[in-house]
Amino acid sequence: MTIDAHQHFWFYDPERDTWITDEMQRIRRDFLPADLEPVLNANGIDGCVAVQADQSEAETVFLLQLAEAYEFIKGVVGWVDLRSEKLYDRLEYFSQYEELKGFRHVVQAEPEDFMMQPEFIRGVRQLAAFDFTYDLLIYPNQLKAALHLVRTVPEVSFIIDHIAKPYIKDQKITTWSNYMTEIAKQPNVYCKVSGMVTEADWQRWKPDDFRPYLDVVFEHFGPDRLVFGSDWPVCLVAAEYEAMKSIVEEYVKPWGDAAWAKFFGENAVRFYNL
């Protein structure tokens, strides 16, 4: 089964979705399963994982409703207040939904030390009791805190979204590479090869721009802990789905059929228990 392990759905709301800037005009509209399904079919993808874009439990419920209605949505990464004193009760409630696989917080919008805060660490630790995963949405300057988190909570399975958004446009790699090398040593951490085109020059990127970054994650995470994700529809500001997917297809091809099958499906099935 081939899986796109990272995409989003929304009814566009200009007051809520302020992160969609003027430069991202193309995605200032609704994006729903009926829009994605033909794209997945055209690209040989059997299913996907829908990931939260809004920080509300209503978002989690919205995605779960879509997953119930569309068979190709194999899993949901939702949102819950991980710092709430009532977190355990909320996790217990959400555990009834088979499609709900884990949670995410938009940490990239938080201070650098956010993941070191005791109440946040306490909340993430509680995910283990329900076998929920945690998606790390971060920038490179937050990798130090992420490393602290994954070391402190080894009982939770983590996955780094968008290879931690390295500064591809500026060709900066050293600090990001050093931290990614360290974080990859933690066996409870996977990495999504997703979202890279949006960190490059949207109009002038070339496939070779991504190779140094792909070299790092493939060397250190290896073929067993990397998964493919499109970040559709956000990727559309910089590339069509096919173009974005072709970047990683060309890179993975020399690794052989077994690595290809793991990267484009088996690893995501295992990580998210799809």
Image: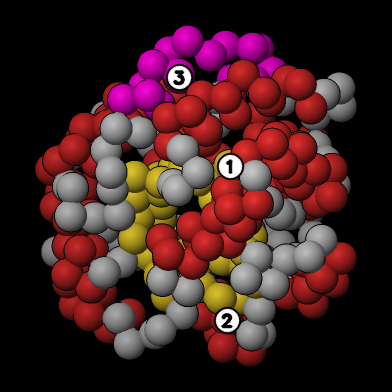
Q: Residue 176, which numbered label?
A: 3
The verdict on residue 7 being magenta is no
Spot occupied by residue 71 in the image (x, y as percentages of width and height): 64, 85
Which quarter of the figure has residue 210?
Answer: top right
Which of pointers 2 and 3 lies earlier in the amino acid sequence? 2
Q: Residue at (69%, 36%) from the top-left corner?
A: 254
Q: Quadrant of the N terminus?
A: bottom right
96 or 22: nearer the viewer: 96
Q: Look at mark 1 in the image and give the residue it sits on.
A: 193
Query: Amino acid under label 1?
Result: Val
The CA distance from mark 2 to mark 3 is: 35 Å
Check disc 2 and give the amino acid type.
Answer: Ala
Residue 178 among magenta residues: yes
- Does residue 104 appear to the left or right of 118 in the view shown? right
* Residue at x 33% of width, y 80% of height: 94
Label 2 sits on residue: 67
Left/right placement of residue 189 relative to residue 36 reads left
Q: Can you tell which of label 3 and label 1 is closer to the viewer? A: 1
Identify whether 224 is placed above or below 171.
below
Instruction: Give the magenta-colored segment's residue range.
Output: 167-182
For the point 46% across and 38% down, the residue is 222
Residue 16 sits above or below residue 30 on the image: above
Q: Residues within 10 Å of mark 1 (few under 14, many from 20)?
A: many
Q: Are marks 2 and 1 in contact (CB under 8 Å)?
A: no
Which numbered disc flags the more N-terminal residue, 2 or 1? 2
Residue 79 visible in the shown view: no
Tell me how far mark 2 sits from mark 1, CA to CA.
23 Å
Q: Residues within 10 Å of mark 3 (few under 14, many from 20)?
A: many
Please provide percent x and percent y for residue 257.
Answer: 65, 51
SS assignment at label 1: strand
Q: Of 154 and 215, which appears nearest the observer?
A: 215
**Residue type, label 3:** Trp
